[in-house]
Each structure stands twice: as C-alpha cells, then as structure tokens.
Amino acid sequence: MKKRGVEKKPKGMTRRKFLKMAGAAGATMLVSAPFVHTSEKITLRVISQEPDPGTIKVLESNFAEWESKTGVKVLLDTVPGGEVFPKLTASIKAGNPYHLGNELFIGNINIMAANGWTVPLTDMIKRIGVDDFGPNILFPMKGEIWWYPYDYNFAHWFYRTDVFKKKGLKEPKTWAEFLHNAKACTAGDMYGCCLGTGNGQWVDWLAIPFMWAEGIQLFDNKWNVIFDSPQMKPKVIRYLNFFKELYQYMPPGMTQLVWADHIKLFITEKVAMSPYSGRLVDHVDRYSPQLEDKVGIFTYPSSDGKRFAVGHGYDGWFVVKTKYSEEAKKLLEWLVTEKLIEFYATVPIHYQPTRMSIYNDPRWKSIPSVKKHWDVVQVMKSFLTRKDIVLDCVDIQGPEIDPRPGKITREFIMPTMLQNLVLKKLAPEECVKIAADSMRKVMKEG
Amino acid sequence: MKFKDKHIIIPFLAPGILVTLFFIVIPLYMAIRLSFFHLESYISPAKFVGLSNYIRILHEPAFWNALKNGLFYSLVCIVLQVSLGIGFALILNEQFKGKSFVRGLTLLPYILPTVVVALTWQWMLDGNVGIITVLANKIGLGRINWLETPNLAMFTVILVSVWTWTPFVTTSFLAALQTIPLDLSDAAKVDGTSSWQRFFYITLPILKPILVIIILLRGIWMFNKFDIIWIMTKGGPLRATEHLPILTYQKAFQFYDVGGGTTVATISFLFLFAVVMIYLKVFPVED
C-alpha cells in the first residue's frame, strides 16, 4: 500500500534533470574553451572572382594539397567578378575576414592599401623578380607593391576571318575602315559588331579603348579633368560620332549586354567582330569548335591609323592584413611559383601571363590550347612590347596610381555618356559636357 | 493577461520579439545611425557629418528621379494588380468546368522564384532574339527594344511585376468572395439588379476591409521591390527604372557611399511610414 504524502519519484527526463544536464554541459564547454582554442587548426579563407569551373577545381585541389603539406586548411569562396570588395569589407567588419583574395580592379587594391587592410607583397615580388613582370602591371603605391598580378586581360577585337575573306575585307586600321567592315558584315542574321552600353565596368573595358588609341586622357598632371578641354574635346566628339554611326551595325539589346555576352554573340555567329580578352578563344574551343580556325585578332585603331590600343585589364592576388597574413603569403607564394602553370591551363588564352619568363616556360608552351593558338598568343604577347600600342584603362588614368579614377568606373560615367548619345540622342558636345562635369563631381568628392 | 499565464505567454512571445529585435529593430537603428556618418565602406573610419548626407541627397536630381520612378512604378502596379486581381477573382468565383485546374494555374506566376521569372522574361524580351520581340516583328509591330528605350523599360518592368504578383491579389479576393453570403446576391438578383450593381453595391462594400489591406500591402511591397528591376534593367537605361531601393543599393555597394545609401534608405522608410499612417487614417482598418 502506498504511504500517504510520499510521492513516487517520476521516471524519465524531468525539468530538473534537464536543467542540471544543460548546466553541466555549459560549464564543461566554458572550462575547455581555452584548450580547444589553443589547439585550433589554422584555417585560411580565400575569396576569388574567377568563375571558370576548371579554375575553381584546380584551386580547390591546390588548397587540399597545401593542407596535406602544412596542416593549414584553406576554404575557397567564389563570387561574381567585381564583388570581391563588398564581400571582403563585410567579412572584415564581421570579424571573420578573408585572408587571401583576387581582384580585377586595381582601384580596389589601392583603396585597401591606402586604408591598411592589405599587406605589401614587395618582398615576394622581389624574390620572384620584379624585372620579370611585363609593363604597366605592378602599380606600386607608396613605394610598395600591394598585389601579385597573375594575368593580363587585354580587351582587343576578334573577327571572323572567313566572313572578312568572303567580303574582301582587311583588318581595320582606321575608324573609317572599321565602320566599312561593320557595315559590310551586317547582313541577314549577322551584325557587324557588338559593344555593350549598359551600366557596367565592361563598357570602360571594351567600348572606351578607341579613346585611348585616339590619345584621349581624362586628367592632367595635377588631377584636373581635361576630358572637355580644347585639346581633348574634339577627339572625344570624333569618338562619339564614330560610335553613333557604329551603333547601327550592332544587334539590338546593347544596353542589356554584360561581360561574356560579347563572347556569346561571337560564338553564336551573331556578330562578325567582338571585343574581349583571350577568354573568347577558350570559349570557341569549348563551345564552337567549328570556328576554331576562323578567328583573327586586331587592336583598337585610332581614327587615322597612327596609334593602336588595347583595353587594359588584369587580375591579381592580394593578402588581407590579419593575424594569419604570413601564412597567407606563404600559400600565395607557393601558388604563384609552383602551381601557376596548372592555374593558367584552366583558361589558357584568357590568363595571359604577366611574367615574361612564363612565355618561354616549356610547361606553359605545351598546354594544348596554347600550342593550338600559338599565333594568337604571339600577337597578344606583342601588345606588351609594341611601342605603337597603348595599354590604358580608366582606373589607371592620372599622373599616378590613385583610388579616385576608379570612381569614374563605379559611377558609370562612360556608360551614361554612351547611353546619352545613342538612347537619348543628345549631341556629342552635350554628352562630353555631362561626362566631364560628372568626373569633376566624383573627383571633388574624393 | 492573467498573472498566472505570463510564464506560458512570455516564452511563446519571446522568440518573435527577439527575431524582431535582432533582424529589424537593431539593423534599422544601425542604418539610421550610419546615415549621419560619411564612410566609404564598412570598415573605413566613419566621420560624423550630421545632416550633411541628407542635405546632399535631397539636392541630388538622382534622388528625386528615383522617388518619382518608385511612386510611378508602385501606383501603376497597384492599380493594375488590384483591378486585374479582382477581375480574375470574380471569374474564378463562378462555376465552370475545370475551375479547380484554372485556379491552380492562376497561382503559377506567384509561386515561381522571382529570379526565374525575371531572367525568363528578360530572355523573351531580348531585343535581338527574344521570342516576344521576334513575334512582335513578325506581326508587323517592328523590332521593339523593350528594355532599351527609357519609357518602354519602365512599362516592361511594370508588366512583368503585374504578371508575377496579380495572383496574390486574385487569391486574396477569391478567398474573401467565399465569405459573401449567397442570400445577399440571390436577393439582389430577385430585385432585378445588374451584375455591375451587385458588384459595386454588395461585393465591393463587403470586401472593402480586405481591399484596404491588399492595397496597403501591395503598395509597401511594390515601393520596396528590388529584385525584378535589378535583374532586368539594374535601374537603367539612363536611370529610367531606378527607384529608391536601387539607388540605395548602388550608393552603398557600388559607389561605396555607405552614408549616402543609408540616407536614401532612411528617407525612403520615413516617406513610406508617413504615407502608411495617412492611408490608415483615411482608410482605417476595421476590426
């Protein structure tokens, strides 16, 4: 018989038992935390804007190899081109920064260096050999080199050699010849050329190099905007008139065109001429092998054929200033000395080497695509040495490397100028004025 | 709330309050606070500038253009969504063969992911090879540059927005129509009223509370809509489709003007808040 007033002890989990267990677990975690922290494995986080699946695979494989060699774990995050900077700054603010990254925009590297968020790589570059690097690529600032540039991405023109041959056309050396070719190639389903005019960095890279060939500069030696000066304005107007006429030989939808859409129009045989870097050739190999032996290249001509230009482009690695900067530098040096050719082999024509010794490296020369397109590769290499070719872009304008010109790209001043011309149909003079005033505004804001 | 029930009610309320605090209230406070600073990224030193950002933004033509675009976009979308939504709801409320199937089909645009909708429409409206562009050309309308002409671009994004979100209005009204007693409409029919009269004098007054809520919600959502416009036009061409959310994003994440971006966001929030308060005063939500 049950005794009165004596309750049976409840079986199973009770609230009191649960609270006791939770308290014990929490205390154990607190006590063991220092031990766990001191025995923590180093993990490096890498942010990359290289989207090619082959490149991602190779990087992941390299990082796995590094971990097995050194015990340092490496995690890779891939983001679209141009989105490294916002994600990187957010990671720093969140207290969980990336340690190593690559970037396509030297303006962002300059901002990071100026603010002390990256560490200089001068010692590493000196070990590799400063003189081995090609022209206009290291961009030292305050006496230091802040990145390891791993490729040139020159924007130049690709054209259909078979279409040109059929229509009796030559590689254009002047704007008049360029227009003539574009007009001649616009027939049936094919258009002469394409140039995106929407709000994006590709416009500065792909549509503006005609201006560099023409000798147009944005600033004088004292950072005054000279885009609408008596010397520059006639040249800019000449360029805008040329662009306005060229626009009628482009397919509809140019404001919607982004980066690799220029390649797509070429490999789907919608245009006879398209600007891009070597990635176009890699895409032809992969997706349109029927065009393999029908691709030629030429540079942006000036109006009179006396000068030529390529749109300067590049990518490079940087090391973020964190407690693991030295570890990240070691990883980077290993990547760019022992694994570089493997990286290049993923998109070989697009990743134009920045070091002249690579061009003679038998491992690089034996990459199948490099061998197949050896003539194209040699032309691209000649961009580095020819005195009549200008390598220029908006973010390196001015008397010295400075973050401010990058704002011109980021605020889409050049795309707006072209849209004013072809969509709003403003007079070229007015387009120049609006663009120059916008440049002065962003330079004043700093 | 009885004192003895607090130990049950508070644990149920607490998660919602915490989520609201951490994901709405605190970020809102931080964003408004940032609007009084000048900073070029999330980690550059912030410099207190008081109301300078507000004065600067309010003097920028881009801000007023974005406000105008946002108002135009949201008003036209609301009018079209509500009128089409009510129309579809009335049709779907009738008895016909295959009603259930058609009702399910009506929901389809709403349940598709917005990114899929925007990209698909972008491809269909491509100025060169888009299927709608090609068909329009074939029937003699010429090659229409849907997203390239500033005026046409705005109407195009409105069209896509209306296509996507009208089903929400349709479903809400259809559900509300089920609550109208059949006796009312039967009695009205016996009295010889037309279908228009029944709609305006019976259906609409009964549905007024839900109409007020729908217009309020659609207005807020369309004013703040970012995804469709960003994917299709990125605010272009020539800022023709740029509204306040897009201007906020561009300033904060592309132009590295974080102070400016949060200022635009704060002004947008205050503007919308004021409009909602006035709206609820004029059209109070009935119990």
Image (cartoon, coloured by chain):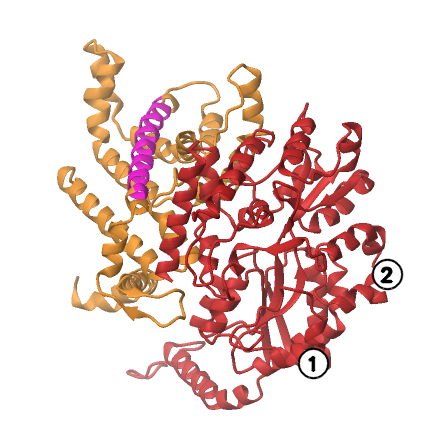
- Disc 1 designates what residue? A127
Q: Position of residue B180 (x, y in %)?
A: 26, 27
- Dot 2: chain letter: A
Q: Residue placed at 74% from the left, 56% from the top?
A: A382
**Residue A437 inside the magenta-drawn segment:** no
Residue A394 is tagged as: none
Residue appearing at x 48%, y 66% in the figure: A402
Report the quarter where the C terminus of chain A lies.
bottom left
How far apart are the two marked residues, 2 and 1, measured between alpha carbons?
A: 26 Å
Q: Chain of mark 1?
A: A
Amino acid at circle 2: Ser
Residue A313: x, y in percent?
A: 61, 57
Pick whichever, A366 or A142, lies toward us. A142
Q: Which residues are magenta?
A: B65-90
Residue B120 visible somewhere in the drawing: no
Residue B263: image quadrant is bottom left
* B198 lies above or below A40: above
Q: Which chain is orange?
A: B
In the rendered structure, does residue B66 fall within the stretch colored magenta? yes
Q: Position of residue B23 (x, y in %)?
A: 34, 61
* Crowd class of label 1 (few under 14; some 14 to 19; many from 20; radius 10 Å): few
Q: Which chain is red?
A: A
Which circle marks residue A366 in the picture? 2
Numbered disc 2: secondary structure: loop
| Amino acid under disc 1 | Arg
- The quadrant where residue A62 appears: bottom right
Residue lying farthest to the left in this orientation? B281
Can you tell which quarter of the image residue B69 is in? top left
